[in-house]
Image (tube, rainbow, N blue to C red):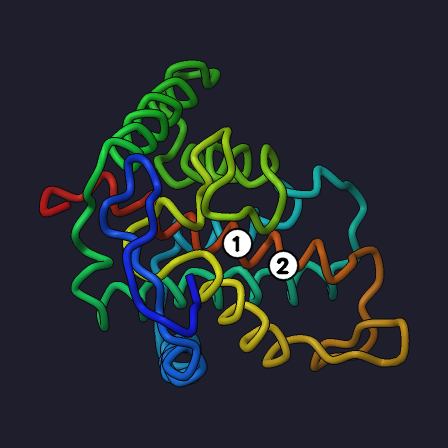
Amino acid sequence: MTSAEPGALPVEGRDDLVRIPDEDVQEMVNVLAVETRERVDRAELEDDVARALSMGFPLVTRREGTPKETLVVAESVARFGFMARVAEWERLTTARKPEGWMIAGLQGAVESSVAEEVRESDDGEKPFYDALGEVTAFFVRREPLDVPYDAGEGFVLMWTIPGVGGQVRASLREETLPMVLQRDGEALRGLAGPIEGATVEDFRRTWKYGFLLRSFEEFFREDY
């Protein structure tokens, strides 16, 4: 949460939330944006992770018949969201320190949902990242894109994941989206040309999907 004056945010279940002075926020966003871009450019993702990221747009929008060119751009957007979380995890100690009952509750909900996805698949052997992608998309669809830190219902996802707060993450999203998308009047363009069958809101949610896919993946690590 940005503020002219630093101080704790009185949010139940989030003792770690603090206000960040306004003058420090843009510098943090700029640093994370550069590191995110570098990671997207050089990282080689495992096939199952890449597949899950490619599933983000159709899972979040539940739309069929999207042009291939749009899906290619959407996968890139999801990678930026994924690597934004990687950059945050690597740079900030607080991103690796889950505290409070809210994150514990979210972790339990994600773990049980993934187990259910696998259990209910046709052969009970759905790949882990396919199940995680389904669960991530469900969480993305069930709340507005940007939720205030003091919202009264739900897990308030981008404020619950440890690290920086949702307001900083939204700024980082807006800083990195133009690395993939360009405005052309009312239309959108990718590097290969015009984009059809998608809105800016769709891509913002796809970025969030990528960010949360990586965040939820952390719940299953032995060192989390």
- Left or right of residue 14: residue 50: right
201 in relation to 23, above or below: above
> Which label was assigned to residue 129?
none
- Name the secondary structure under disc 2: helix
- Specify the quadrant of the image occupied by residue 196: bottom right
- Left or right of residue 80: residue 31: left
- Name the secondary structure under disc 1: helix
Q: Residue at x 63, y 59 (%)?
A: 204
Instruction: Identify the amino acid type marked 1.
Output: Lys
Q: Could you say which is closer to the camera, residue 35 or residue 47?
A: 35
Is residue 213 visible to us here?
yes
CB under 8 Å between callouts 1 and 2? yes
Residue furthest to the front in view is: 5
How many discs appear? 2
How would you rate the neighbour count of disc 1 (Cα within 10 Å): few for under 14, some for 14-19, many for 20 or more? many
How would you rate the neighbour count of disc 2 (Cα within 10 Å): few for under 14, some for 14-19, many for 20 or more? many
| Mark pair 1, 2: CA separation | 6 Å
> Which label was assigned to residue 204?
2
194 in relation to 72, above or below: below
> Which x, y percent locates residue 44?
35, 70
> Which label was assigned to residue 208?
1
> Which x, y percent locates residue 110?
36, 30
Q: Residue at x 54, y 76 (%)?
A: 176
Q: Residue at x 55, y 41 (%)?
A: 140
Is residue 34 visible to us here?
no
Q: Residue at x 35, y 25 (%)?
A: 109
- Left or right of residue 60: residue 134: left
Instruction: Identify the amino acid type marked 2.
Output: Arg
> Which x, y percent locates residue 215?
34, 49
Say which quadrant the N terminus sits in.
bottom left
